[in-house]
Amino acid sequence: MLLTIDVGNTNTVLGIFDGSTLKHSWRVKTDPRDTADELWLQYRSLIEGFTVTGLSICSTVPATLREIRTMITRYFSELPCTIIEPGVKTGVPLLVDNPKEIGADRIVNTLAAHTLYGEAGACIVVDFGTSTNLDVVSPSGEFLGGALAPGIEISVDALAARAAQLRKIELIKPRSVIGKNTVEALQSGTIFGFAGQVDGLVDRIIDELEELYPDSGNIAVIATGGLAPLVMGVSESLEYHQPDLTLIGLQLVFARNFPKN
């Protein structure tokens, strides 16, 4: 079975695939201070009962990636492994000014989105994580670029830290847009505000895509990331919710590099 590991700035998501089928997934916090042995103990407890025959990994945290490399050398040295970095076959052309600065998660999300939803045309992936990433995929599966904005949680944290009379709140949809108390007002501004931000950016991106590819057909808009459920029922532009998009992309990259495994 394939173990996929997506290391984000806030959380790490792990998944076990049997062929192309995701059997199980886990979400744990990312701590850049964890050593290779601590990571091994944590991951081993999660995947107990599964026989791992390969690994596919992407990371936006250099310190954790360094320790994961050490962990692989110590505990998985006999297994085929893909780490998303320059030189690894992903099948995703990066049509940007500096391909080396594109996060590995954005590359595998592009591959997964095009594979799952790109039959009809271009795609827009909205990844709700530490930052909110909007990644644009051409009808041919190329990564065209996108937009980056502060994420929902860090925006709430920053507001609570800088405003003396405001505090951290539970991130849920309020009763109405017009909040009747401070908590509901904060929830409204956060949930409806971020939905409006995403809808506005998606509309502008679609306008540009329709100029670039006038005959491309439908443009699929896919939400992913740990905070996507907060906005799914509020946003007018999000069509699909695929919480495992990055893990699926990691499985697809592994299959490209080790087709016989």
Image: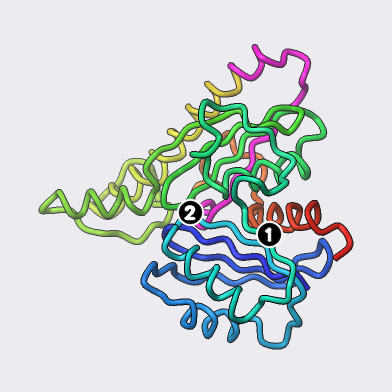
- Which image quarter: residue 43? bottom right
Which residue is identified by label 1? Answer: 82
Quarter of the rendering occupied by the C terminus:
bottom right
Q: Residues within 10 Å of mark 2 (few under 14, many from 20)?
A: some
> x, y percentage for residue 44?
60, 84
The front one of 115 and 153 is 115
Residue type highlighted by circle 2 = Thr
Which residue is identified by label 2? Answer: 60
The front one of 193 and 36 is 36
Quarter of the rendering occupied by the N terminus:
bottom right
- Which image quarter: residue 9? bottom left
Please determine whether, in this image, residue 178 is positioned above or below residue 224: above
Q: Is residue 63 magenta-colored?
A: no
Q: Give the left or right position of residue 123, taking residue 134 as reference.
A: right
Residue under the image location 77 percent in, 45 percent down: 116
Q: Read off the magenta span.
A: 208-230
Disc 1 secondary structure class? strand
Marks 2 and 1, how far apart at CA: 15 Å
